[in-house]
Amino acid sequence: MQEQKYSIKNWAKDDRPREKLLFLGAGALSNSELLAILIHNGTKEKNAIELAKDILKLGKDNLSELCKISVKEMMKTKGIGQAKAVTIAAALELGRRGQSSPVLEKPVITSSMELDRYLRPKLKDHTHEEFAVLFLNRANKINHFEVISKGGVTGTVADPKIILKKALEENAVSIVLCHNHPSGSLKPSRADEELTQKIKEAARFFDITVLDHIIVSDEGYFSFADEGLL
């Protein structure tokens, strides 16, 4: 941390907020630093952070009040042209809409039947095999669904490295593997079983649990967990 703080002091003033966000996250920045990123460049007289402080003063250093300031009013601040003012106004409006948007409901998975209801409509009608993964959080809520690979009528290849990399990016506590059988057969192949065990063992090193592997088709679904194959 000391090295990061030292390096920040050596950056150009206009660049510091951007680099600070990359190193420490957006929550570590002040309102003026966040605004400075939107302003991007300062002038000969003032850097971006100083311009941001001038803009904040228009709203009495209160973001709710700043939301009421028009683009024309912002442009009265020396160094803030139309492009900068429009960018700030757009960001404030996005923030306002974000506050009023409903929280996206994430489905909770508690059984293979629920997995089937979620997964089969997404995969059953393809004429080629697709391998997909559900990434779940600690409460068994679906954070993300992604098709990892697509193949031919008889099979597809899923790379465990890609699956685990994505699981770490999604902060997944557990995952569900899934693929379709265009033939309609629900019987897992030997390759299906071997891949499942391979991913399960690799995931264990990252404290990620493979909850199930679901095969879907027009005929129904097959659950590795239900059949004792996990």
Image: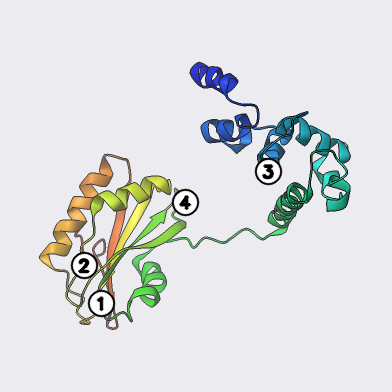
Secondary structure found at label 3: helix
Residue annotated with mark 2: 156
Residue annotated with mark 3: 38
Dot 1 amino acid type: His
Mark toward the viewer: 2 or 4: 2
Residue annotated with mark 4: 139
Residue 55 horizontal/vertical position (percent)? 82, 39
Q: Earlier in the sequence, mark 2 or mark 3?
A: 3
Residue 130 horizontal/vertical position (percent)? 28, 70
Residue annotated with mark 1: 128
Secondary structure found at label 2: loop
- Answer left or right for 9 relative to 150: right
Q: Quadrant of residue 47?
A: top right
Dot 3 amino acid type: Leu
| Circle 2/circle 1 CB separation < 8 Å | yes
Secondary structure found at label 1: loop
Q: Residues within 10 Å of mark 1 (few under 14, many from 20)?
A: some
Dot 2 amino acid type: Thr
